[in-house]
Image (cartoon, helix red, strand yellow):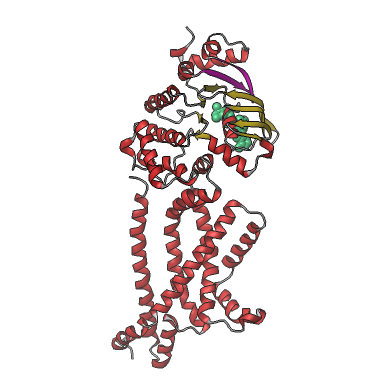
Amino acid sequence: MSVLDFDYMVGLVPILLRYLPLTLAMAAAGMALALVLACGLAVIRVLGIPGLNGVTLLFISFFRGTPLLVQLFLFYYGLPQVLAFLTQINGITATIMGLTLHFAAYMAESIRAAIVGVDRSQTEAALSIGMTNGQLMRRIVLPQATRVAVPTLMNYFIDMIKATSLAFTLGVTELMGATQKEAAGSFLYFEAFITVAVFYWVIVELLAWCQRRLETRLNEAYRR
Amino acid sequence: MIQVANLVKRFGDTTVLDGIDLAIDQGEIIVVIGPSGTGKSTLLRCLNFLERPDAGQLTIGDLDVDVTRASRADILAARRRTAFVFQNYALFANKTALENIAEGLIVVNRWPQAKAHARAREILSRIGLADKADAYPASLSGGQQQRVGIGRAMAAQAEVILFDEPTSSLDPEWVEEVLALMKQLAAERQTMLVVTHEMGFARDVADRVVFMEGGRIVEQGPPSQLFNAPRDPRTRDFLRKVLAAQPAISPS
Ligand SMILES: Nc1ncnc2c1ncn2[C@@H]1O[C@H](COP(=O)(O)OP(=O)(O)OP(=O)(O)O)[C@@H](O)[C@H]1O
Ligand SMILES: [Mg+2]
């Protein structure tokens, strides 16, 4: 069996396609939640809200300083032992939770940098006409910061899609979990894993293409 | 009517405003001059609460506050009654010229968008930029940006417009158009408090010139008196230096 079994690989494609939606859904949910959390953390950091600022720094430090796999195990196996109401946490939920917290920690810093990058004189101009801090953020600072942060955030989304593959260690049958099962049945490990690798690769390249187009558009913004 | 009484501002140990008293009548055009680092910008910024003063009483129209006790509502009220024109324009980069002018009307005065845009268009034609309504700041010249900056201040219908060196960042070619717009406002008797190094503007347009040094008002008076017969040696010294650099308007 020195030659690749192409028929097997082709046959694997429709099987794996069935698990693609779960992979994408976990990434999309994780990204949406992480964005909300990261914006909150970034605003706390920018405003330097006493007390909360320290907690935020600790949060960011922990979730950037420990491996995602460790965090996932902590949520899936560890949390139910200490939090009684979580007698059982489902693998998908634990994955989304882990992805959210882990990536929010990284994204918060990018968003903070983008916010701080908005010219300070615009902040003063907004305050000088009587805008509140909230109005200033919503209407002037965040729209501009978004344009700066989007390319970086897209990178995190790409990372997150790849990171969903860790969910298989929590017993979730997503793209990677399904491949693992198929390979264990057929013993064609190389064929199975190269096929799933191509799956991830194609998704990531599609997103990278979108990212490049988006970046060109963003660079043209506000120049008319 | 605006009245500032015993305004004090410190940064750490240095007293930057050392008890400023100033009254401005409605429709009056006041130009503030003085050496660098004297507190001219700080004075304007305190009136707008971009800096929090350490002491003083501030009266702007129907608002009367002890600045040390000013609440958030007082600060917003003071900001609505004063409009600021910045040296570096400080336009909102994500908003068109029209939106820059309409923004305060929509967000602060809660006007419906259509009404605010209609007013912004009126102002754009008054500042000679009707054709630039949809242009973003990045595509405007410095002079055009500063005129939009002034337009944004006009929209606020404040008791007073505070100008902090509105022409100092401009390339020389754009200075005239901005000064011309300011003269137009002065002719309409818009109350203005202008910090500038443009002595020609002060001489031609100001009702009163205020000379500041070391955080205090040293001398003030009509431009004819202050430029031609300054009383304080510090004023004379300052004028000699700047007028040597701007010979076109030296005392005749
Ligand atoms: N945020 C600040 N923190 C500390 N010191 C400040 C601050 N802003 C201004 N100062 C100091 O206060 C003094 C007055 O500054 P200000 O900008 O009001 O002077 P100015 O008269 O406007 O000068 P210029 O003509 O150079 O604009 C200066 O010594 C300046 O260094
Ligand atoms: Mg200044």
Which residue occupies the foreground of this view, B197 or A188? B197
| Residue A45 vertical placement versus A62 (above, below) | above
The residue furthest right is B13
Q: Is the C terminus of chain A in the top left, top right, bottom left or bottom right quadrant?
A: top left
| Residue A40 vertical placement versus B179 (above, below) | below
Give percent across and percent down for residue A188: 38, 89
Q: Residue at x 42, y 34 (%)?
A: B151
Where on the image, by quarter, is ligand 1? top right
Give percent across and percent down for residue A15: 35, 86
| Residue B152 vertical placement versus A161 (above, below) | above
In the image, residue B160 lies in the stretch drawn in magenta = no
Which residue occupies the foreground of this view, B176 or A66? B176
Task: Answer with the quarter of the image where residue A12 lies.
Answer: bottom left
Which residue occupies the foreground of this view, B161 or A92? B161
Give percent across and percent down for residue B125: 34, 33
Classify residue A93 as left or right of residue A210. Answer: right
Q: Residue at x 47, y 67 (%)?
A: A32
Q: Is the N terminus of chain A in the top left, top right, bottom left or bottom right quadrant?
A: bottom left
Q: Residue at x 47, y 26 (%)?
A: B190
Task: Answer with the quarter of the image where residue A193 lies.
Answer: bottom left
Please count the marks in the image: 0
Provide the residue span drawn in magenta.
Answer: B207-221
Give percent across and percent down for residue B199: 48, 18
Secondary structure mostly seen in magenta is strand
The residue furthest bottom is A185
Classify residue A213 as left or right of residue A31. Answer: left
Which residue occupies the foreground of this view, A69 or B59? B59
